[in-house]
Image (spheres, helix red, strand yellow):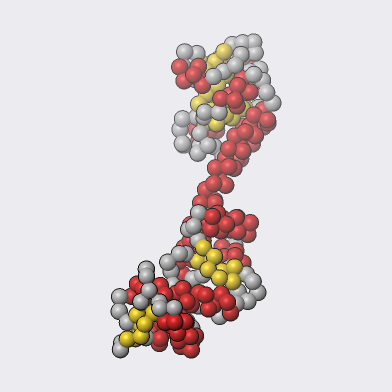
């Protein structure tokens, strides 16, 4: 027979099964072959082991197909391995195909592999989310290369996870490529943050970054700023800042006043 979640939830075939002890289960069909199924409803750790004892006894005494339905939050990979060793099929709540396979007599290992895959996929999504959050937190403080991010996060995440989640953040615009080092490595940061200039930037990247940072600083400051102020904030020499200001002035994006420099372009 093929068991469905509808039949399991209906409870019309719930009852006691007489094995070594009389066991209460959510579903029992005497067969042949007999099929017994139960649902793990408690998050209490001992509840899983109680189900293993119950279903294992029913399987051994009645030569029944035994099935345990659970959410992924209540059972881990090691639990599934233990159940497999006792011949118990573990089905993820809502996995109709898995339930069909188990009640039809499919191989226990094959059935339980579906549950393990679901656990690992869920774990992978959680790890990816945590990694993205960690990357963003680091980039709030300073702009970094992929290699620097991998080094900073190596105790928590693998290199492949860090680089793939960095690419994901770039695709959605949460993180952007700001410049490149003299070695050609990309340097990444968060939009809208004015980072101190890095000493290892390539010359074109450094000039491009300083021009953008100075423009943003002047347009958002609301008051005149001196080249010394900008130099200190951006960790760049006053000579470099003055060079950028002259370029912006020639392009009519900045103007000098008595108190310093102001933005004169269009926002």
Closer-to-camera residue (97/75): 97
Q: Position of residue 245 (x, y in %)?
A: 44, 83
Residue at the (44%, 72%) spot, across then down: 194
Residue at the (56%, 58%) spot, across then down: 166
Residue at the (50%, 61%) spot, across then down: 175
Q: Quadrant of the N terminus?
A: top right
43 vs 118, left or right, is: left
Closer-to-camera residue (81/158): 158
Q: Quadrant of the C terminus?
A: bottom left
Closer-to-camera residue (39/2): 2
Residue 115 lies, with reference to residue 23, above or below; the image says below
Q: Position of residue 20 (x, y in %)?
A: 58, 19
What is the total number of numbered labels drawn onto the structure image? 0
Residue 53 shows in this picture = no
Q: Position of residue 128 (x, y in %)?
A: 54, 51
144 vs 225, left or right, is: right
Residue 251 shows in this picture = yes
Residue 264 lies, with reference to residue 171, above or below; the image says below
Residue 124 lies, with reference to residue 185, above or below; the image says above
Residue at the (40%, 87%) spot, across then down: 228
Closer-to-camera residue (49/131): 131
Q: Quadrant of residue 106?
A: top right
Q: Position of residue 173 (x, y in %)?
A: 49, 57
């Amino acid at each position: 027979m093929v068991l469905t979640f509808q039949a399991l939830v209906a409870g019309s075939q719930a009852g006691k099964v007489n094995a070594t002890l009389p066991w209460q289960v959510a579903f029992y069909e005497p067969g042949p072959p007999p099929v017994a199924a139960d649902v793990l409803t408690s998050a209490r750790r001992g509840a899983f082991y109680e189900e293993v004892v119950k279903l294992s006894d029913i399987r051994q005494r009645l030569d029944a197909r035994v099935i345990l339905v659970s959410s992924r939050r209540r059972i881990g990979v090691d639990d599934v391995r233990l159940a497999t060793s006792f011949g118990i099929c573990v089905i993820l709540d809502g996995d109709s195909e898995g339930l069909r396979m188990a009640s039809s007599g499919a191989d226990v290992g094959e059935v339980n592999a579906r549950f393990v895959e679901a656990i690992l996929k869920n774990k992978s999504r959680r790890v990816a989310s945590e990694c993205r959050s960690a990357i963003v937190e680091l980039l709030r403080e300073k702009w970094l290369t992929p290699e620097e991010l991998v080094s900073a996060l190596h105790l928590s995440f693998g290199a492949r996870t860090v680089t793939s989640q960095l690419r994901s953040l770039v695709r959605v615009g949460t993180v952007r490529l700001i410049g490149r080092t003299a070695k050609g490595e990309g340097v990444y940061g968060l939009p809208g943050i004015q980072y101190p200039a890095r000493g290892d930037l390539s010359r074109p990247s450094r000039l491009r970054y300083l021009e953008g940072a100075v423009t943003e600083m002047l347009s958002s400051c609301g008051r005149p700023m001196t080249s010394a102020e900008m130099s200190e904030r951006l960790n760049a020499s006053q000579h470099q800042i003055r060079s950028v200001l002259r370029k912006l002035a020639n392009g009519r994006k900045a103007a000098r006043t008595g108190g310093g420099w102001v933005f004169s372009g269009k926002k």
